[in-house]
Amino acid sequence: MDKPTILTGIRANNDLQLGNYFGAILPMIDMAKHHSDQYQINLFVPDLHSFTTPTDLSILQKAVTSNLRVYVAAGLTIDNANVHIYRQSYVPAHSELTWILSCFTGFGEMSRMTQFKDKSTKIKEDRISVGLFSYPILMAADILLYGASYVPVGDDQTQHLEFARDIATRFNTMATKYGYQEPFIIPEPVKKQHGFFGKDQGLRIMDLVDPTKKMSKSDELGKGVIFLSDAPEIAKKKVMSATTDDKATVAYNPAEQPGISNLLEILSLFRQQPILDVAAEFAGMTSYGEFKSIVADEVEKFLVELQANINKVDDDAIQKKLEYSEALVNEQANHTLHKIQRVVGLRPAGK
Ligand code: TRP
């Protein structure tokens, strides 16, 4: 750990969509490209997190591999020695540190987590798991084991990141009290983190059927969502039947023409042109059908290319990278874990 570390968890979902692509996958690949000379970059699959909410366990293995294939197809280079790609459950120190940290975390502290409150009210049939409740502690362990300074995450995770800073500070204070050096590197304050991922572009992509809500994998019917695995013709149809308005003129006006504005946003992301330039190019076009077919063609072209790249991905190379990274990060993680085991009295003092 000579270089500062940037770390992020990339959840294994079987159904990545356009919002994930622009909002999470591309920024992550960009970060790996641009910062790997000065930082160690840890990209990991938080697989222990997969079943905090009720889920189909039979798809989890496939989800991990298929997501990694998408990342590689989208440009993540696996031959970069400063980029570590690993699965959380292959590094047992995550679970062990989580238990220790959880014994020094207040019940009240966890109860205040807004993501838990949101998610737990949405679970209808099944039980609400203790894992969902205490998950931020696992996330803190994910971060602290590697002394990560930067943890680019979405807004929904900032409270968890604050918790990681709190628990790390608590342990450092405790360690000093017992005569040890401070074991944890404290992640940078959340405000300082924001420069890294830039503005979350994926947040701009809205559902095609209901353009007032974010495009999200949790849309049950999936008609308003372009999944990266959609057959290109199907995706095209989804664009053609996107909700618009009755103004009959293309304009960028998210408040009054959210559907058309969303399609302009999508074009702007594909073409990597500023939204205002794209809006100017199509301003005043009166046929929504014509406009939609331009967007639909772009979406089709994108999916055809991406899916061809996915088919070319070398699974063995990914597997090798995982195994190599996992051996390496296990050493780093165990080093941190041993320090903590000494502080809490599980191992003899010394060294
Ligand atoms: N909680 C994150 C999410 O839901 C994923 C995650 C797990 C993570 N552990 C992490 C992100 C550690 C950053 C650092 O998206």
Image (cartoon, grey):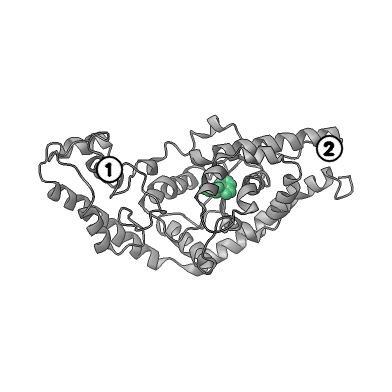
Which is more N-terminal, label 2 or label 1?
2
Residue closest to the eye, 53 or 282: 53
Q: Secondary structure at mark 2?
A: loop
Q: Which residue is mark 1?
A: 262
**Residue lying at 26% horizontally and 62% vertically, measured from the top left:** 234
Quarter of the image where the N terminus is located: top right
- On screen, residue 81 versus residue 303, left or right, reads right
Relative to 156, does residue 53 appear above or below in the rendering? below
Three-letter code, disc 1: Asn
Q: How would you rate the neighbour count of disc 1 (Cα within 10 Å): few for under 14, some for 14-19, many for 20 or more?
A: many
Provide residue 333's location: percent of width, then percent of height.
Answer: 70, 51
- On screen, residue 204 versus residue 129, left or right, reads left
Q: How would you rate the neighbour count of disc 2 (Cα within 10 Å): few for under 14, some for 14-19, many for 20 or more?
A: some
Q: Which residue is mark 2?
A: 180
**Residue lying at 73% horizontally and 53% vertically, measured from the top left:** 96
Ligand 1 under 8 Å from disc 1 Cβ: no
**Residue lying at 56% horizontally and 61% vertically, measured from the top left:** 321
Provide residue 130's location: percent of width, then percent of height.
Answer: 65, 52
